[in-house]
Amino acid sequence: MATLSQTRLEGADNARAKIANILALYELHRFTCSRVGEDNEDLTLSVEASDILEDHNLTIESSDDEIDDIVWDVLRCDCLGVDYSATWSSGCKFDGNPDTFKVWLTVGGPSCYITGDFGKHGIPDSDSLRVWFSWASDPDFIWLEPNEKEAIGWYVEQVAV
């Protein structure tokens, strides 16, 4: 039987794998946005981003539209669902917009999800982003680096806004 520390490690590993996939999708998105008019010979991608292309029979020389289509397909398939929450008090006017979100990446064991707050103009607040994981224990979260926050913020904008 797995110990609590083993299940926490498995949950953390699962969450890190999900973060790596989001980083690769964001890299591919930025790649297609930045290579306009550039020579493709000097451009390189991470192993994870290259693997996504290879899994879909694409290469670095594939068209931007083909790569973007794969990015959006993978992005939508990775997101299992989004929960929204809004709060307001009696006597206050409710604008109908959610305050917080939870983007489900996996369920069951281990579960993995992203939480955060909607900031101004309904855009996710990068300082509020957390990638949570749990498996038969209290949830824990992964501390995010600035580049991870940027990529996860982009991801949430695509699936939850």
Image: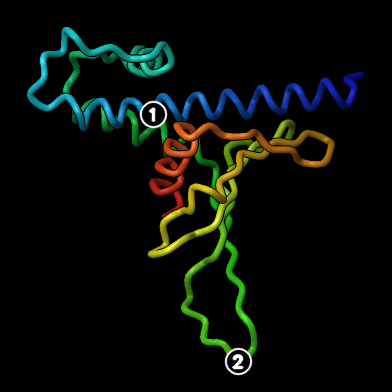
Position of residue 14 measured from the top left corner of the image (x, y, whole percent): 64, 25
Mark 1 Cα-neighbour bin, 10 Å: few <14, some 14–19, many ≥20: many
Residue picked out by circle 2: 91
Residue drawn at (68%, 37%), measured in percent from left and top? 141
**Mark 1 vs 2: CB contact within 8 A:** no
Q: CA distance from mark 1 to mark 2?
A: 44 Å
- Coloured how? rainbow
| Quadrant of the rendered image containing residue 8 | top right
Residue drawn at (57%, 34%), measured in percent from left and top? 144
Q: Quadrant of the C terminus?
A: bottom left
In the orientation shown, which residue stands out farthest toward the top?
41
Position of residue 49 measured from the top left corner of the image (x, y, whole percent): 38, 18
Kind of residue at disc 2: Gly
Foreground disc of the pair 1, 2: 2
Residue picked out by circle 1: 25
The answer to whether residue 103 is left or right of residue 60 is right
Q: Earlier in the sequence, mark 1 or mark 2?
A: 1
Residue drawn at (54%, 48%), measured in percent from left and top? 81
Position of residue 27 measured from the top left corner of the image (x, y, whole percent): 35, 26
Residue drawn at (48%, 53%), measured in percent from left and top? 125
In the orientation shown, which residue stands out farthest toward the left?
37
Q: Is residue 16 above or below residue 40?
A: below
Mark 2 Cα-neighbour bin, 10 Å: few <14, some 14–19, many ≥20: few
Kind of residue at disc 1: Leu
Question: Which structural element holds mark 1?
Answer: helix
Count of marks placed on residues: 2
Question: Which structural element holds mark 2?
Answer: loop
The answer to whether residue 84 is left or right of residue 51 is right
Q: Which mark is residue 107?
A: none
In this rendered view, identify the residue nearer to me: 56 or 21.
21
Position of residue 23 measured from the top left corner of the image (x, y, whole percent): 44, 28
